[in-house]
């Protein structure tokens, strides 16, 4: 159940909400029942449902928990078969027995973000006051709100201090927010392929995706859940545009080049002549099976609004004053969406407060998506930093 | 009047075509009346209308003609007010009296490309056999076809040899096609921010734009001309996505950063909070006023299909064997759509045939669109090369 309130008084004007998807596999808990979550927008949310998965076992002193934060279109199914697509978990090469985030040693938690569509409260949920889905009346959420909801889950699990918080892309934004807002609750932080603020170019790409969705007549100003048609065409185009940004020019050249798809000659028409076209169309078509268009609007907006320096007098270092968190930043050479320069800015800010910080740029042509792919050097760095930190802390 | 034929016999099965836009300012001529143009697709086109503009005066020995080839969304109005938008010509800083392409010295020709929507035959034109617009029944055109139509214009003007052919982006593709196919008709060639083949990434971005258009219900499989609504939402999204690729990350940061548009705080909603969003929406909305959605499909496809090496046993150098054309290639450091590496490949091919070739990479943060912007070093290079070549040829 989710409740949204515009009131400053938690006990007034609550809008109760029921999850639209009942019975998401894994853990589904209701939070914010006693005290609603105060969102950055000024609205109050609660009670609301949060869905999460765990892997491995929490040790006796609750010191071995690693929070894995998912990216824009990720979810809590990091290391197991996805309940809708049947695909392997999005980080199944990283999280598991004997893997860099070793579930034999650590207790791994992965939480579907606020605004999402895999069980955690989002625009697809039912507003009990109306009996109908929220759509755009769901409150805007921010990275701060996403992390605040995660903090409630961690509290619920009785974990006072996370051994590690990590994640790529939007996951890295959450890692930075955790380290900045709750430094006493984080032992080490590994933001991967991230940034301390969303760039103009990235906002631009997000805006294109949103406009693709919002210009689909089936979007119906966000109130499409009860109609026959979902805004799948717009959502598919949004995904296609975004997917290009997740890869590098050279990876696209290597994987697809100008190869034709199942034909000897071009069609002299608008079929998917080229493999890259067929691949992109597939990416768009398969995405709409598992993702909600309004959630895409909400979560892209959360990323756009992220600007950690702006919350600290425009001095990024102020976000990390006196921090004891051990940082390890990782970027990828061919990532043009969250280029190394963005990670370097964070490193400079951490240096300015004499924080403990490692920084590794991994050489790869796989682009932004490298954090989701088989990258041995990346796995080695991740594994090495985590196990060394765990050794130091006797975990 | 335009005629399309599927027959190998020019006198059989012709489909006569009337231009949808009558009275485009400037020159409108009918070509291919006696012998239709044989398109790469195997179809035959003719008679068909071509619209073009000229600036300056053709000298007595017809030796001072410069053909300026426009880019994807450009047109023949290079150096004068656009008849629809009222904006200045797209190359008004380059073409004119005393400018790098000096109309006091040269006779400048700029031709709307085949498949376009500014007077030259394209999918918006009327099929006289049906009395209705062609839509998708207009034949697919290629860069080869576009240049073949230009060659007919040059023949019509009585020009045996162009002093220079130049253009940026898709214009550069036409320049390369000219130099390769009609080397005896070109004295010097200046491909700017171009490539000898369209990359996988660029095909991908074009496919996103096409899918945005084709998924707009108002597109109606290309037969929208007689309906109340044009596929402007899809075309606008296509333009927005493309426009991001024309700029560099750093230029977007410099121009817009994370600045808000006409507000002190974010809206916590989906308004155009950021300047970059407002700018992109404006780009999309203004584009649909001057461009036809089907033309956008056709011309992007022409670019996708361009692969000069593929036409020459996959050896790019073979496209320029024994060439006497003097080349000057220009690229821009921050252009990630047509990066310098693409120009360098062409230079290597030209070196391999001992061609006369200059190559300059201009340092700028303006991205691909730099060839349309105030770039003094670019102007200086262009002016220097052209005037030196003209001096050598006593023009």
Image (spheres, coloured by chain):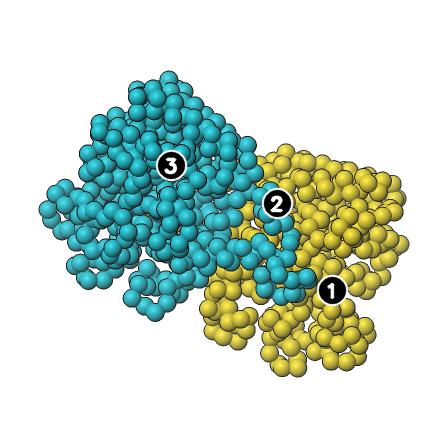
Chain colours: A yellow, B cyan
Circle 2 residue: B254
On the image, the x and y values in percent for residue B360 come to: 48, 27
Q: Secondary structure at mark 3?
A: loop
Q: Residue at x 21, y 46 (%)?
A: B29
Quadrant position of the C terminus of chain B in the picture: top left
Answer with mark 2 or mark 3, whichever residue precedes in sequence: 3
In the figure, is residue B303 to the left or right of A64?
A: left
Q: Secondary structure at mark 1?
A: loop
In the figure, is residue A122 to the left or right of A37?
A: left
Give B85 or A268, whichever is nearer the viewer.
Answer: B85
Crowd rating for badge 1 (residues with CA inside 10 Å; few <14, some 14–19, many 20+): some
On the image, the x and y values in percent for residue B179 come to: 32, 29
Crowd rating for badge 2 (residues with CA inside 10 Å; few <14, some 14–19, many 20+): few
Q: Chain of mark 3?
A: B
In the figure, is residue B166 to the left or right of A181?
A: left
| Gap between marks 2 and 3 measured at Cα | 32 Å
| Mark sitting on residue B97 | 3
Give A98 or A210, whichever is nearer the viewer.
Answer: A210
On the image, the x and y values in percent for residue A190 come to: 75, 45
Circle 1 residue: A40
| Gap between marks 1 and 3 measured at Cα | 57 Å
Q: Chain of mark 1?
A: A
Q: Give residue A380's quadrant in the image.
A: top right
Q: Nearer the viewer, mark 2 or mark 3?
A: 3
Q: Give residue B71's quadrant in the image.
A: top left
Q: Are marks 2 and 3 in contact (CB under 8 Å)?
A: no
In the image, are marks 1 and 3 on the same chain? Answer: no
Q: Nearer the viewer, mark 2 or mark 1?
A: 2
In the figure, is residue B245 to the left or right of B265?
A: left
């Amino acid at each position: 159940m989710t409740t949204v309130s515009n009131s400053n008084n938690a006990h007034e004007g609550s809008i109760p909400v029921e999850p639209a998807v009942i019975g998401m596999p894994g853990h589904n808990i209701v939070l914010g029942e006693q005290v609603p979550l105060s969102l950055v927008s000024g609205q109050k949310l609660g009670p609301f449902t949060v869905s999460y998965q765990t892997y491995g076992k929490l040790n006796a002193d609750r010191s071995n928990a690693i929070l894995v934060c998912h990216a824009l279109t990720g979810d809590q199914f990091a290391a197991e078969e996805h309940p809708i697509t049947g695909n392997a978990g999005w980080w199944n090469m990283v999280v598991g027995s004997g893997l860099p985030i070793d579930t034999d040693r650590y207790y791994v938690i992965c939480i579907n973000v606020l605004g999402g569509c895999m069980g955690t409260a989002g625009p697809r949920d039912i507003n009990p006051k109306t009996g109908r889905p929220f759509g755009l009346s769901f409150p805007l959420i921010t990275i701060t709100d996403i992390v605040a909801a995660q903090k409630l889950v961690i509290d619920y699990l009785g974990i006072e201090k996370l051994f590690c918080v990590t994640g790529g892309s939007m996951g890295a934004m959450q890692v930075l927010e955790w380290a900045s807002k709750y430094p006493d609750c984080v032992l080490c932080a590994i933001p991967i392929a991230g940034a301390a603020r969303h760039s103009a170019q990235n906002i631009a790409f997000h805006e294109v995706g949103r406009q693709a969705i919002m210009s689909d007549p089936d979007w119906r100003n966000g109130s499409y859940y009860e109609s026959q048609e979902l805004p799948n065409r717009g959502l598919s185009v949004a995904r296609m545009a975004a997917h290009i940004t997740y890869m590098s020019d050279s990876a696209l050249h290597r994987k697809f080049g100008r190869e034709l798809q199942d034909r000897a000659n071009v069609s002299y028409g608008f079929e998917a002549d080229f493999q890259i076209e067929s691949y992109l169309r597939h990416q768009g078509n398969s995405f709409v099976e598992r993702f909600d268009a309004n959630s895409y609007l909400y979560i892209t907006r959360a990323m756009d609004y992220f600007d950690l320096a702006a919350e600290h007098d425009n001095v990024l270092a102020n976000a990390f004053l006196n921090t004891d968190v051990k940082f390890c930043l990782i970027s990828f050479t061919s990532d043009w969406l969250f280029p190394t320069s963005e990670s370097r800015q964070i490193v400079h800010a951490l240096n300015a407060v004499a924080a403990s910080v490692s920084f590794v740029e991994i050489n790869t042509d796989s682009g932004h998506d490298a954090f989701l792919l088989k990258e041995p050097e990346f796995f080695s760095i991740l594994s090495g930093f985590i196990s060394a930190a765990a050794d130091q802390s006797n975990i």
